[in-house]
Amino acid sequence: MASEAVYSHRDPMLKKRDDFEDILEERRNSSDLRYALRCYTPVLYKGMTPCKANTLKSMVLQSNQLRYVISQVSKETGRATDDVREDALAILEEMAHSLQLSTVRFFAFTLSKVFKTLFRSICVNEEGIQRLQQAIQEHPVVLLPSHRSYMDFLLMSYILYTYDLALPVIAAGMDFMGMKFVGEMLRMSGAFFIRRSFGGDKLYWSVFSEYVKTMLKNGFAPVEFFLEGTRSRTAKSLTPKLGLLNIVMDPFFKGEVYDVSVVPVSISYERILEEALYAREMLGVPKPKESTSGLFKARKVLSEDYGSIHVYFGQPVSVRSLAQGRVNRCQFNLVPRHIPGKPSEEIQNFVNDTAYRLVRAQEENMVLKPWVLLASLLLQNHHQNQTAGQERGIALDELTAQAVWLRDVSREYGAFLNWPGVMTPSEVVSSSLSLHRGLVRICEGRVQLAVEQTGTGEPHGAVTPEEELLSQAVVVLSCASYRNQALHVFIRPALLASAIHAASSNQKQEVFNSFSFLRNMFSNEFILCPGATVQDFEEACYLLVKTRALQVTQQEVLVTERGQRTLAFLTSMLDPFLQGYQVICRFLCEEVADTLTEKQFIPAVRKFIVKHLLAGRLRYTEVLSSDLQKNALAALLRLGAVRKIKGAEPGTLKVNAVMVNSLEDTLGGKLPMQKAVSARL
Amino acid sequence: MDPLPPFTNTEAAWRPNSGSSSSSDRQRIAQQRLRIIAGHLQRSEDGDSSSTVLLAAECKAQESQKTAEEKTVPRKRHEIMKWNGWGYSDSRFLFNKKGQAEFTGKRYRLSGMIIPGLKDWFEGTFGASLQHKTPATPVLTSSSVPPPTLNEAFVEELKSTGIPFSLEAEDRVFRAHGHCLHEIFALREGKFGRVPDMVVWPNCHNDVVKIVELACKHNEGTSVSSALECPPEETRSIVSLDTSQMNRILWIDEKNLTAHVEAGIVGQDLERLLNESGYCTGHEPDSMEFSSLGGWVATRASGMKKNIYGNIEDLVVHIKMVTPQGVIEKSCQGPRMSTGPDIHHFIMGSEGTLGVVTEVTMKIRPMPEYQKYGSVVFPNFEQGVACLREVAKQRCAPASIRLMDNEQFKFGHALKPQVSSIFTSFLDGLKKFYITKFKGFDPNHLCVATLLFEGDREKVLQHEKQVYDIAAKFGGLAAGEDNGQRGYMLTFVIAYLRDLGMDYYVIGESFETSVPWDRVLDICRNVKARIVAECKDKGVQFSPLSTCRVTQTYDAGACVYFYFAFNYRGLSDPVHVYEQVEHAAREEILANGGSLSHHHGVGKLRKEWMRDTVSNVGMGMLKSVKDYVDPKNIFGNRNLL
């Protein structure tokens, strides 16, 4: 019951979703200044009055937990408790937010101006807002937005301000702090800053967790953070990080609050501001350090059209009802609750499971624009043409017909597709293409990816093949990031399609084994709930049978005539990933000496891939994505095919060549997929 | 009111004339009681010719210190007490023709008074209406009680011992239940499950020995003390052993300050008789009107004034219990012994599964010279709990200190009797104005602690000051003796009030737990919220009353008492809903670090959590004791394990 509240597998077509309202519309018709200065009186948890930032700090410093840890650290290090307390205070000063209404009003004004320039509309589901308002009054609330852009958290606060809801405090990465003035502005609009890594630092962890819990328990403000930990550069959801989720659930486990409401929020951008930036980053152009001047350089983005944003506030999820029957809260009875301890396995599993379900809940309410479908089709077309050496591109009306087909399929799979009903399909297609004109080119009625450097002028003097490859890859990766937005809709059927393709027979068990192998292989790549292999398999079968692409009997899985097209589409969707993982396996077998460290892995593998791409031995430019490379390495580490050893340098990789080799062969279909079977049907 | 079925030591009865009342009061009530009992005796003499009850044989071994006329509990309990509700038949709440609440009878301070605020509170809190009544079946129809299953050989041999017994329906029904909601609810509808097949009244320890021997010989199921819920699957004949006639103080030892007492004596008699000699035990569970010494021992009872006198385990010096294996007792009365695990602790809390407690030696104290009630108003419950914690930390708790939450404060307020003079009502208004307007307390958050001090006059006053000083640090304001006394009165009326509620679609119950100090606030909040959420979830149409109070303080924690009641109009199976909610509330208690019970015991209601509570090995220990002491399960009430 409880789990269905977050994400239900059954017929996705039946999902009921709320309608959207455009909040920019009113901004275009009335004064921004008046809006920024209007009376703001949000309702708070149990009618609490918000507490001053300083009161909050002293509450944290005086908490039992922190006092305990301070004395522990002082005993361990031999330093005076007062010194350690000074440290704790310093950490707190560095971390704490200083939410001020005046700053929020400033942002309300400027963001109104910026948003109106950048976006056509910002659509919010108002029913979700009402549910949130209700939830805030009843229980402490945690907001979990998806993270695709820097915009996200300002946008969230902007929306909550607009609807007169309590402003959240937001966990932000310390890198923002580098931007001096902006960092402080963000702090004053409710951000608090945490270091990216503080693994061993007991004191830091203690200050941090107590700070978050104090805010949450007392209901001073909703706590907001990003489950994915960082912005997803690929538009795919990232494997959730569990630390903060654990912290916000802790007060419930320990009985300090009756319940905690967790609200997944899905923010979908029609065009991502950081589009090309992300692609470059993944290709090895390092991420520019956040700096204020960098932000001003980004000004030119202001002159472009970024389409619309959809923000969907999901159903609040009660941690209590999720934990019902799964977590025995009695486990905290025998130790004072303020003594920090490692969460039990039961709790870790529960938090991990919940995190995946919440990310899926985010995915589920992501709004997909027609362009997402077009990008998928164009990418596949791009790669097919490349090999077949046919005429470049695809005819516009052909593209339109395919898009309409894909629209219907994706709807059947439960995609939250925002396909304008008032326009004809060809109007929809051409308006989508024109918004993304940086990525596509229409030439003589044929549409193709804008991979060749043309138009702007004379050929550059010294363009090496590698440079050309990388510049093509920027377009491909940008395009792929739009296709990725739809991956969560297709991933389970796609895994099944690939499994059928790879399996040596139509035997259901055989197909399941393949499915299970692939799913296991890609579980760092896509959001696949741990331990849900059978459910995922059944869901995939259900969808494909429903769309009459497949017939599943007791024993066999048969592809129907009409299913060929669907399955071909689905397998091609997964193909770049399959090839990527294979090539990484090959790299590890062929190239790696004993000295490769984790740090050197990405540059080395990139060099290897570039070489093979230039030689024409690889089809997909996409495998240049460092995201894919990292995920593959993580998967191999998880499967034990590669191990991290403490060699001369930390993080030296030790490759189990036999295993990596056989994984590569299995991925390539040269070996039957039996080894990784984790469950039987 | 109490969920514990088998014993009468339920924590929800009023102590008649609590300490402060004058001796003339006491006399008046004693006389009144004599009249009732005289009447009762008359009737029972009349009945003797035709009834099956046998006359009691003189018990030679024992020396009786008091005459039969002083007994509070007659053999025929139903002649002075309700068979399908709480307490004395003459005392009950009702709404009179004008729609005002009044309390009938003459036994209590509130008796014969009009309580003007109750109707509004009742209707407001529960959404109940005086138009919608659910009256109880007025009389017990003997024909609807299943006939007794008898073991003829046992009955014959019992007759030959001369110990009185009865097979009458009234007697058997009265002893077939405790005061759990589902039990009373069924009785009000005139429904009976498995009832005992016969009731026996032993007169002394030796009688009990004989009965238990006979029961072992004939493999009868026996149950001790007062009534209990009979296991429906029990096929053997069930004998209910009513120890109410074993109610003598056998001796008082003034040198060692101990008294040796028969275990059937009820609390009020024990206290009254000791008072006549200038002593008291100080053990005052809220149910002391009706609960017996043996019951206290069997459930590990706790008294209101435990801060001075201790709980039952602190008060008991020596216990004699008849088991199927023979009599268990210690050989001396040393105040503390290191002789392996204390065998008293097998007996205390055994809930009638091992044998019959027949005689107990208890500590006694000289009667306190001076008693004083008091009360403190706090701006909110959090402050109140913090104050109680500080009082416990400084180990200066008065004889009793209890903290009621806001809902109970309002409830207490609704129970104020009609004031006679304009002056008093003016004064009340002034007080209210001072607290809410001048001191800025929110009437929807403030809560009250009630206090009872006891000892010699000077020390009481000193002690009082110390406690009020601590209270002041937590924002507490002294709120007078009267409020304190009324707070304690609430404890008893709430048991009678349940019967009133049940006349109007309202059912409810109380339950308790003990919990470490750092969890008190959390458990109170979460359990109350859970009750509300579960009621909503189970389709209860009206918001329930969900309230709590902290009733005892210890060094390391406190005892918390919850009350929960709701209007069940529109529900097809209210008792089932009630049970589901209570079950959920208990789960919530356990999840928040509370114990399974502070003093109510386990019975059958909470058995399912015993294993988790005491671990597998602990269960095995208890089971092996039961297996040795009572291998044939003669004491077959199936409590605890």
Image: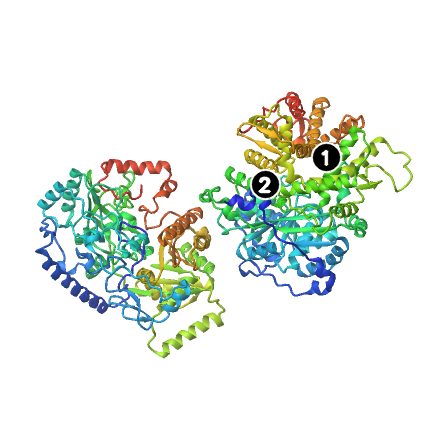
Host chain of mark 2 = A
* Tag 1 secondary structure: helix
Q: Are marks 1 and 2 in contact (CB under 8 Å)?
A: no
Amino acid type, residue under disc 2 in the picture: Tyr
The residue under the point 13% across, 54% down is B64
**Badge 1: residue crowd in 10 Å (few <14, some 14–19, many ≥20):** some
Does label 1 or label 2 sit earlier along the sequence?
A: 2
> What residue is at 73 percent from the left and 58 percent from the top?
A112
Residue matched to label 1: A626
Q: Position of residue A182 (x, y in %)?
A: 73, 52
Residue B307 vertical placement versus B344 (above, below)? below
Query: Does residue B151 lie above or below A37 as drawn?
Result: above
Question: What is the x, y in percent for residue B337?
Answer: 27, 42
Q: Which residue is mark 2?
A: A356
In the displayed image of the protein, which residue is found farthest to the front? A561
Q: Tell me if residue B164 comes above or below residue A651 in the rendering.
A: below
Q: Indicate the chain on which mark 1 is placed.
A: A
